[in-house]
Image (tube, rainbow, N blue to C red):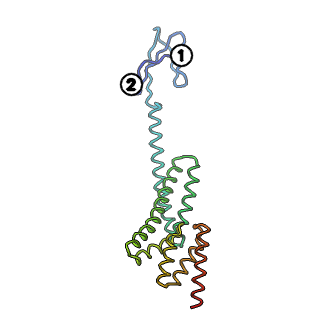
Amino acid sequence: MLAFAETVESRRIVLTFHQEKSHHVGQFVKLPYTSKDENVVYTLDMSKWWPLKKDKQTQQTAHQQEEQAFRAYEAELRQHLAQQMAAGVSRQAILRDVEATAIALEQAQATPDEKGRLRAYDLIYGDLRDELMRNLQTGRILEMNGRVDEAVTYYETAVADQMSTRFPYEHLRIIYRRREQYEDALRVCAAGAANPFLEDKDRSHFQSWADKFSQHLQAS
């Protein structure tokens, strides 16, 4: 019969065996019985299989694997991002692809590699989103403070990024129309009409203005 001592100290546990019944210890160790005493006390070293120690080591290993995967995927993603932008892919298009991949990764098995990869995609997504919003907000603040020429530069960047809001297109349309820069107004409105990330009603709105500017240029 197996009995455990009351205390466990320094990952060592005292096991007590009764003479007439015990010749083994569960699934862990097999010890021959030789003593003539009524009870025999053995001390079993648990340091090599102690569950808490194993869990801690496993967690540390998994964390290291996740960190390595995160750094590798981040570097790979940033390189791929630079290549896409150099090829003329808009930030908004890249953002949508990154978001779709991140959503898929959230449903995948939570291995250290997949966790690291998801973290990398989340980081890139946040950076892209912040940069898109920063261009838009900077342009808005500059325009409100009367620095329209500087605001135009940021709005044009937002248009090139194919932002999923009509704000930069509409403000450029108004600015160029007031300045009688109809070719620029037509270009911006045509870009808005072709932007797949805008709502249908917004694309129709800019298509209508593109037609008006086109007719005006033909008549002049």
Of residues 40 and 90, the one nearer the viewer is 90
Helix, strand or loop under label 1: loop
Q: Quadrant of the C terminus?
A: bottom right
- Mark 1 near mark 2, Cβ–Cβ under 8 Å? no
Q: Is residue 129 above or below residue 103?
A: below
Q: Assign a secondary structure to mark 2.
A: strand
**What residue is shown at x 39% (from left), y 24% (from top)?**
9
Tag 2 or tag 1, which sits nearer the N-term? 2
x%, y% of residue 90?
Answer: 53, 69
In the image, what residue occupies the spot 60% across and 85% down? 215
Q: Nearer the viewer, mark 1 or mark 2?
A: 2
Instruction: Quickly name the residue at label 2.
Output: 9
Residue linked to disc 1:
23
Q: In the image, what residue type sits under mark 2?
A: Glu
> Is residue 140 or residue 158 the one in the foreground?
140
**Horizontal relation, residue 4 to residue 218: left or right:** left
Return the x and y of residue 185 as percentages of the image width and height.
Answer: 52, 80
Q: What residue lies at 46% left-to-right and 52% top-to-bottom?
A: 68
Q: Which residue is at the far bottom?
A: 220
Q: Nearer the viewer, residue 173 or 85?
A: 173
Q: Residues within 10 Å of mark 2 (few under 14, many from 20)?
A: few
* Residue at the image point whose x is 48% and y is 44% from the top: 62
Up-down relation of residue 178 to residue 111 (above or below): below
Depth check: 185 or 191 in front?
A: 185
Q: Which amino acid, mark 1?
A: His
Q: CA distance from mark 1 to mark 2?
A: 25 Å
Mark 1 surroundings within 10 Å by alpha-carbon count, few (fewer than 14), some (14 through 19), many (20 or more) = some
Give the numbered dot on residue 117.
none
**How many numbered discs?**
2
Position of residue 139 in the picture relative to residue 183 (left or right): left
Looking at the picture, how far across and down is residue 158, in whole percent?
Answer: 49, 71
Q: Position of residue 178 (x, y in %)?
A: 47, 82
